[in-house]
Amino acid sequence: MGIGSIVVSMEKLTESAKKYRDTLPDDNNYSIEELSQMPAYFGWVKCQHFAENEPFVMFLGGNDDGIALRFFWNNSYEKTSLKIWSELSIDSRVIIDVGAHTGVYSLAALTSNKQAEVISFEPNFLNFGRLNLNLRANTFSTKNTFMLGVGKAEENAAFSIPFGFDYLSTGGALGSKDDQLTYSASIVSLDSFLRQDQRSMVDLVKIDTESHEALVLEGMEGVLLKSRPILLFECIDKEVGTAVKEILLEYDYNFYLVDEVNGKVIPVDEIEPIFGQDGRPIFHLLNRIACPDNKTPRLGILAK
């Protein structure tokens, strides 16, 4: 098959996907398994989590990115988390996106506050390429994107990438696995990577590192002490959640569960995943927020 034939085939698939999408309600809640069966779409996807938020675009290449895929078919992705993140970004100085993937949280922060210094870390070279593409498409600079992992200390470590239909958003994780692509990734700590002036101005941090969140926190204790940022992170492992809680209690943090479906932020004492009947963490209850005492009132206002 020649290049021309491939392009025509992609255009037909894209047109088919658009037509089918037009027959559906504006907002849907398809699972990732259901989305994998949808017609393939190739092109830019408008991403707008609330009407009052300025939209941005992300590229979707034949259903390869689960985040852009959800925006295209469901018209949303982590709606409550992104709403709060965007509003907190408005008056933040330095914003850190650890495990930036293809850039949804970096884009939301920059769209909300174009003067903020948003620093994005992504060790998965496939995601990193799409992250930079998405930033440029929205006219944002890529000078603060780094193909690095974040952990407790500087080191080189094995990093493995699983392959699936949405291979750009499967993330990857530290460690070597026989059935996955494994390569050596450079790891840094935030305390060693950030300049001294940056460490005292970090207002907001997102951490999505596939159960390595405690290691990230151990490597940013200087940031926690000097800046006391609000943290948004994923919780998929009980032991990791306990370790995260122990670290953050030393800095007088309070904890909240984000309910993406019902638009609620619920105070919790423990940081532990909530599992469904299939034994997997419930997708719309994955995220947690950790907020220091002095910033808790503002979080309460935004959550309403």
Image (spheres, helix red, strand yellow):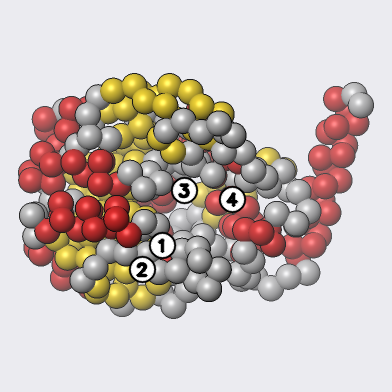
**Mark toward the viewer: 4 or 3:** 4
Residue shown at 28%/23% (left/top)? 155
Is residue 81 in view?
Answer: no
Viewer-side residue, 283 vs 179:
179
Alpha carbons under labels 1 and 2: distance apart: 7 Å
Residue shown at 24%/74% (left/top)? 267
Residue on which disc 1 sits: 286
Report if the CB atoms under discs 1 and 2 are less than 8 Å apart.
Answer: yes
Image quadrant occupied by the C terminus: bottom left
Viewer-side residue, 77 vs 58:
77
Quarter of the figure with residue 114: top left
Q: Position of residue 248 (x, y in %)?
A: 15, 55
Q: Secondary structure at mark 2?
A: strand
Residue shown at 27%/64% (left/top)? 271
Query: Could you tell which of marks 2 and 4 lies nearer the N-terminus?
Result: 4
Q: Secondary structure at mark 4?
A: helix
Q: Position of residue 287 (x, y in %)?
A: 37, 61
Alpha carbons under labels 2 and 4: distance apart: 20 Å
Q: Could you tell me the amino acid type at mark 1?
A: Leu
Q: Could you tell me the amino acid type at mark 2?
A: Val
Residue on which disc 2 sits: 258
Query: Could you tell which of marks 4 and 1 lies nearer the N-terminus?
Result: 4
Q: Which mark is residue 226?
A: none
Q: Could you tell me the amino acid type at mark 4?
A: Gly
